[in-house]
Amino acid sequence: MLIAFPWEIGFVRFLWLTRRSRGPVRAFAQADAATKERGYSASFMDRYQPDRRVQWTMFLLASIPDCEKDSLLVIGPRYEPEILMAQGLGWDRSGIRGLDTFSYSPYVDVGDMHALHYDDSSFSSIICAWTLSYSDKPEVAAGEMQRVLRAGGYLVVSMQKVGAGYADVLPGVRQGDDRIQTLEQLDVLYAGLDRVAGFEPSVPPKGHGHIVAAYRKPARHAH
């Protein structure tokens, strides 16, 4: 049920938790200035509009044979579908945490990906879907992800790749050569990890596509 209907189940939970149970959405008032377009993100919390693109990230992680399922951090979930999918795919419910600048869910902590409030090596897996592009300091956010990832653990990251002439890009978000949107850039950003999978589209000047990559933290790695 959680794998097949995460959006439908999530919609019911969204209505209950935001309209009937927990009250107003909680916001992180002192988020790092590096987190762009918080106003855009906040506007989405008034309605339930999840994106099925997160399936690519979640299913890639779940397809890794030796991925431990005792703990998972979801960075930028906004809603709960990734969390519901993770439960349906066998992750320990008590070990799943989300982190966003806004939250209505008991599973999603309010915080900043540039200063994660988790101990070193807290999670055996991390997913970061369509979130890193909102950072003006992606190297800081990437460093924090590596810090809280356990040795031998996996990180899967995804984002939109846009052509130079693509117009539908949010203001304030990095563009052009400064935008993190290639496997080469991700390899530099996550230099302490080993890439085990990567899918990068070729896009025309005014087109767009989606890049997804999986990394493993070496067992010998000492952050």
Image (spheres, grey):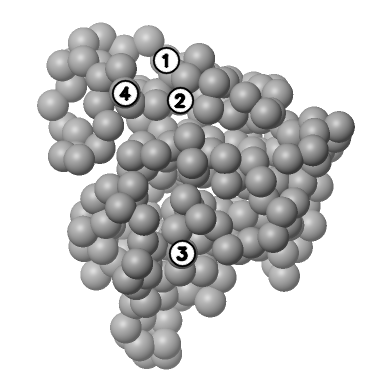
Residue 14: % across, % down: 40, 73
In this view, the residue in front, 163 or 6, is 163
Residue at which label 3 appears: 111
For image coordinates 45% across by 58% down, the residue present is: 112
Q: Is residue 221 visible?
A: yes
For image coordinates 19% across by 34% down, the residue present is: 169
Give the amino acid at mark 4. Answer: Asp
For image coordinates 49% across by 41% down, the residue present is: 140
Mark 3 and mark 1: Cα distance apart in space:
32 Å
Residue at which label 2 appears: 211
**Mark in the foreground, 4 or 2:** 4
In this view, the residue in front, 147 or 104, is 147
Q: Please, what secondary structure does the residue beneath circle 4 have?
A: helix
Q: Is residue 162 visible?
A: no
Q: Please, what secondary structure does the residue beneath circle 1 have?
A: loop
Residue at which label 4 appears: 178
Query: Is residue 129 positioned above or below 190 on the image?
Result: below
Give the amino acid at mark 2. Answer: Ile
Residue 100: % across, % down: 44, 60
Of callouts 2 and 3, which one flags the residue occurring earlier in the amino acid sequence?
A: 3
Of callouts 4 and 1, which one flags the residue occurring earlier in the amino acid sequence?
A: 4
| Quadrant of residue 204 within the rendered picture | top left
Of callouts 3 and 1, which one flags the residue occurring earlier in the amino acid sequence?
A: 3
Mark 4 and mark 2: Cα distance apart in space:
16 Å
Query: Is residue 90 positioned above or below 16 on the image?
Result: above
Left or right position of 141 against 43: right
Residue at which label 1 appears: 201
Give the amino acid at mark 3. Answer: Gly
Mark 2 and mark 1: Cα distance apart in space:
7 Å
Left or right position of 178 against 218: left
Mark 2 and mark 1 residues within 8 Å of each other at the beta carbon: yes
Give the amino acid at mark 1. Answer: Pro
